[in-house]
């Protein structure tokens, strides 16, 4: 009797068509074209040092930090907040952020930003129905639009001065931020790439963001956005939350694992610019207004850091679907461990929650970030598509790629759709008609087709910038520091090459044979 044939698994090469990340058969937590290293885990206190031995041992603020570095702290919460809600990071940098040449108010820009969504603001209007946008227009070829100029508000709720609320943006860019960084002092940015790769540099290190990945930059952290190699344009969505922070939802009866797992959230490692002495502008968004700090050195000069106010990303591909914001947000993460009904009825969308931002109401979040992606549908005797509904949540949906399949043929990737609170809605399309006719109860693999769819100026009385001359850049004057950095870079590259061997069975076999 012959042995049964073993079906050979083949890795999925097109990440936009993977049913789950495991279909790629990758041994790495990131895509092959991601050039950076990361630290894994959600809610941890991480640490990183570019030069080994730079982080002080046993204390945060030594008398003299190594290499003449300056200690700087950033807090994200009240000093006396309980441990689970206490957020801070200590940074060891070439020049402190306080060393600059002063502020410029109301800098010119091409963005359309509105952050006050109170009824007293005549510049905003209340939408009491449904709305849909075709793909948001990309910049013209005869203009250069970077992230500062390419940010536009779609809507929101609340006000950053009240420390509670949310804003939704789209961004469309076609050039890198050149010697200017962005700092949002209002709230956290959750960035979703829809078109083009993004090379994001933060004070604490670098993140590489591709369509199908998200990243979060905490308020107060400086960063810049560049286009990834081979990309000349990019588009995406941003959710900003005020007075709250993103957290993983509790699992309850699910137990210890499921939904989004902490190990899939990746944090950067320390990185500094090679040329630290150049003119820079740091654009600050405060209360929805742009101001700028001018300085003669790079803001990206952290040699080491430790803490839990750290940018992070979720690295995985996603299938053609949507994400929705405001009370609910939706985004496809193929490492997400889906939960679903195994007997009857359509499960509430809460089982698709990836991240949640608490509000002052203990039973109603400020915002949820949900994922609706491919899964098995096995409910018996059940109309498997979502029923018509009038949710208290306001929902924003956006198709990242693939066929949008919204309420009209104009809903394509790069657009958006919104359902205001208690607006009656439900997707009636070909899939809906098919479902009404289909009475078969067999399990089926689905791709969620029904779910894709402008303060007065004042005189600056700040510190004379000349006082910072007393705080020199001692790091650059340290003996042989440039040779040390080159050696660190070479060592890191050699270590990376060694570790790559363990991901490749062929190279590993050759190593063993040697």
Image (spheres, grey):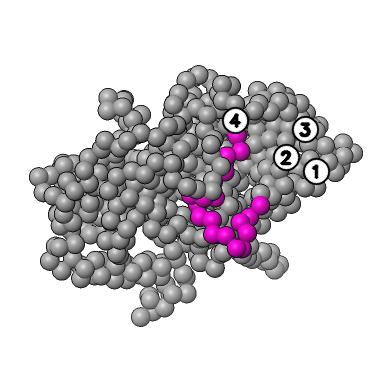
The residue that label 4 is drawn on is 123
Does the image show residue 495? yes
- The spot of residue 508 in percent (x, y) is 42, 72
The residues bearing labels 2 and 3 have C-alpha atoms spaced at a distance of: 14 Å
The residue that label 3 is drawn on is 426
Quadrant (top left/top right/bottom left/bottom right) for the C terminus? bottom left
**Total marks in image:** 4
- Judge by depth and name the residue closer to the eye, 3 or 316: 316
- In the rendered structure, does residue 475 fall within the stretch colored magenta? no
Quadrant (top left/top right/bottom left/bottom right) for the N terminus? bottom right
The residue that label 1 is drawn on is 408
Q: Which residues are magenta?
A: 137-155
Considering only order in the chain, which callout, 1 or 4, is on the residue closer to the N terminus? 4
Q: Residues within 10 Å of mark 1 (few under 14, many from 20)?
A: few
- Judge by depth and name the residue closer to the eye, 83 or 281: 281
Identity of the residue drawn at 51% across and 60% down: 175
The residues bearing labels 2 and 4 have C-alpha atoms spaced at a distance of: 20 Å
């Amino acid at each position: 009797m012959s042995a049964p044939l073993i079906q050979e698994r083949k890795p999925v090469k097109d990440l936009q068509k993977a049913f789950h990340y495991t279909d790629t058969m990758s041994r790495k937590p990131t895509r092959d074209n991601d050039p950076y290293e990361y630290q894994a885990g959600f809610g941890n206190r991480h640490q990183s040092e570019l030069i080994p031995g730079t982080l002080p041992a046993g204390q945060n603020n030594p008398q003299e930090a190594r290499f003449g570095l300056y200690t700087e702290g950033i807090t994200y919460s009240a000093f006396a907040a309980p441990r689970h809600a206490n957020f801070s990071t200590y940074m060891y940098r070439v020049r402190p952020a306080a060393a600059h040449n002063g502020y410029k108010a109301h800098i010119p820009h091409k963005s359309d930003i509105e952050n006050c969504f109170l009824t007293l603001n005549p510049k905003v209007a209340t939408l009491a129905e449904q709305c849909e946008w075709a793909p948001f227009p990309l910049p013209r070829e005869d203009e250069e639009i970077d992230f500062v100029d390419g940010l536009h508000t779609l809507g929101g709720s609340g006000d950053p001065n009240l420390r509670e609320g949310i804003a939704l943006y789209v961004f469309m860019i076609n050039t890198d931020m050149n010697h200017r960084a962005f700092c949002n002092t209002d709230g956290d940015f959750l960035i979703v790439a829809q078109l083009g790769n993004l090379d994001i540099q933060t004070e604490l290190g670098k993140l590489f963001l591709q369509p199908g990945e998200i990243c979060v930059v905490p308020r107060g952290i400086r960063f810049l956005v560049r286009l990834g190699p081979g990309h000349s344009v990019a588009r995406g969505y941003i959710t900003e939350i005020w007075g709250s922070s993103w957290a993983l939802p509790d699992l309850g009866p699910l137990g210890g694992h499921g939904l989004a797992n902490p190990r899939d959230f990746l944090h950067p490692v320390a990185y500094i610019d090679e040329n630290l002495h150049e003119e820079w502008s740091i654009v600050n968004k405060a209360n929805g207004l742009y101001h700028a700090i001018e300085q003669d050195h790079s803001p990206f000069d952290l040699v080491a850091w430790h803490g839990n106010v750290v940018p992070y990303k979720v690295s995985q591909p996603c299938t053609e679907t949507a994400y929705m914001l405001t009370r609910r947000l939706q985004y496809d993460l193929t490492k997400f461990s889906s939960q679903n009904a195994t007997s009857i009825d359509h499960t509430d969308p809460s089982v698709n929650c990836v991240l949640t931002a608490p509000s002052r109401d203990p039973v109603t979040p400020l915002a949820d970030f949900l994922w609706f992606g491919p899964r098995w549908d096995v409910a018996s005797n059940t109309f498997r598509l979502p029923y018509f509904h009038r949710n208290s949540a306001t929902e924003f949906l956006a198709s990242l790629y693939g066929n949008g399949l919204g309420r009209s043929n104009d809903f394509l990737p790069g657009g958006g759709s919104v359902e205001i609170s208690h607006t009656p809605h439900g997707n009636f399309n070909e899939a809906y008609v098919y479902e009404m006719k289909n009475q078969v109860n067999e399990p089926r693999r689905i791709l969620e087709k029904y779910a894709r769819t402008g303060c007065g100026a004042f005189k600056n009385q700040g510190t004379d910038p000349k006082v910072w001359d007393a705080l020199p850049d001692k790091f650059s004057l340290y003996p042989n520091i440039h040779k040390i950095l080159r050696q660190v870079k070479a060592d890191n590259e050699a270590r990376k090459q060694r570790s790559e061997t363990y991901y490749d069975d062929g190279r590993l076999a050759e190593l063993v044979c040697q």
